[in-house]
Amino acid sequence: MGIPFGTDEWIQALHNELNNSDAYRKAAEKWEGDFYFVVDNGDGNPTYLYLDLWHGQSREACFVQDPSEKSPEFILSGPLDTWRKIVEKKLDPIRALMTRQLKLKGNMMKIMKVPKAATELVECCTRIDTEWPE
Amino acid sequence: MWFFKVPEFYFGEDALSQLTLLNGKRAFIVTDPGIVQLGFVDKVRELLETAAFQIAVFAEVEPNPSLQTVRRGAQAMLDFQPDWIIGLGGGSSMDAAKAMWILYERPDIQPDAINPFDELGLRQKARLLCIPTTAGTGSEANYGIVLTDTEEKRKLTLGTREATPDMAIVDPFFTAHLPRQITADTGIDVLTHAIEAYTCNWANDFTDGLCLQAARMVFTYLPRAVASGAADMEAREKMANAATIAGMTLGNSQVALAHALGHSAGAIFKEIPHGRITAIFLPLTIEYIGNGNNGRYLDIARAIGIPAEDEATAATLLAQAVRNLLREIGQPTNLHEAGVDKQAFEDALPLMCEHVEVDANTIMSPRIPDMTEIEQLFRYAYHGQTVDF
């Protein structure tokens, strides 16, 4: 039985994967910035996952009920199908952004300076045994 | 889902006459002083005047154009208010034209913030036409922009799909008398584009055929263009076309590790032209990727007539063929031959490695080196060693 995507348990699993990844730590050693990953479930009730990344480590990760709880520097949003393709490594997140399948609010240039960190973050996602809604 | 975005092309002998049919009133030509001296600006001006254009010229683009030059050119555009921007020259002039045009359309943004993710809403004021005067960069065919941040000593690889030129005119008139050295420096860049776009992570069905055709044309026509110059106009025209064909693959596919290494080294050793320094890394990256069994070199090898039976052999033989081509056209095969001083190389090595690691082209490589391997690749490139890791 996998961990359901979009839950507190799932983002905690990602937190653990990131903190156990030497490759991520090295790739993101200069990164400072927190995120909302917003999942559009198609029902008008998006899911908000918060992740605070700091010098190659995840400092905090949680499911957020009320998006006004946090004010992250970056908000990355897209439909559930797009997130699934990214987590399963079927879609490169940069290509998802370029084709507007994924939208970003925040300083894109800051992200573009750490392309390898983004790649390693996706690698960590793929290591989570994820259960997807039918 | 992906896209394939290219300009409208006019190519071949007399393609430049298309300028007389251009609709518009005010054209702003972005170029460099050398192009003015060669009389190319006058030639373009004459044809545009036939179409009743008023014309302004910004001829201050330097090799590896800086953010400062781009800002200056954009201000000149704001003063002149053109409805056509014409990038005339090599990659530097065309890239500068793209960046200046973006700032002319959007004075509210900074040049280093040009990215493929935000919608800029260009073409409210002007459209972009590019006319290459070398056969190599391919900038006329895509949205890529390479600028130099002179303060950080770093090349910035920028772009937005909206910056794809509306039109490109590829006329062999401009390259007919290109000096031998520039023919080689720019022509070899076509091969690096073609091979990297075919083997990178973003390679796709729409660009694969273009890459193979461009690679084939370089191996056939570049030695002839270098050896015979204007006496072999077939080779000149074919190389001009090959450059644009390979240029179409960039953005629609990508370049990868050889470009990341070349950009990093080129930002330090500015006296070495982009095509020359990047091509030094090409055979090394073919070997490195081939050693990791990550390449698609068999198709390329077969396209250029190398009798390889498997990927490993194809990578080895292709790298060898590239080195042989470099020698045949008088290009260096290592950084030492290219004139890089050993001490300057050692001093620059940490910064170059750091820049490769954060270069967006690095993650396009099907095999991504860590810092130790990046340093090894530079050291092997310095001495021209075969990559054995």
Image (cartoon, rainbow, N blue to C red):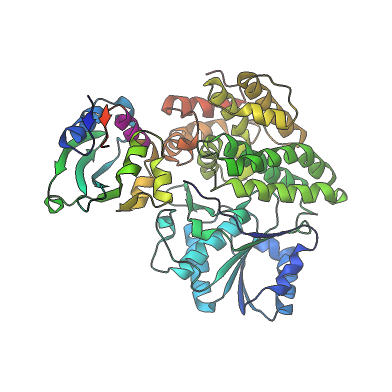
Q: Is residue A28 above or below residue B32?
A: above
Q: Is residue A123 part of the magenta span, yes or no?
A: yes
Vertical arrangement, residue A61 with respect to residue A19, above or below: below
Query: Would residue B48 be found to the left or right of residue B166 on screen?
Result: right
State left or right for residue B263 relative to residue A132. right
Q: Quadrant of residue B118?
A: bottom left
> In the rendered structure, which segment of residues is drawn in magenta?
A118-126
In the rendered image, which quarter is residue B55 located in?
A: bottom right
Q: Is residue B356 left or right of residue B97?
A: left
Total residue callouts: 0
Which is nearer the eye, B224 or B117?
B117
Q: Position of residue A56 (x, y in %)?
A: 27, 34
Q: Is residue B62 visible?
A: no
Does residue B359 show up magenta in the picture? no
Residue B373 in sight from this viewpoint: yes
From this viewpoint, which residue is outermost toward the front? A134
Of all residues, the one furthest to the right in this rendering is B231
Residue in the picture at 52% in, 27% down: B377
Q: In this rendering, is residue B118 above or below B125? A: above
Residue B190: where, in percent of width, then height? 66, 43
The residue that appears at 62% across and 49% down in the rendered structure is B247
The quadrant of the picture occupied by the N terminus of chain A is top left
In terms of depth relative to the viewer, which is nearer, B105 or A102? A102
Q: Quadrant of the C terminus of chain A?
A: top left
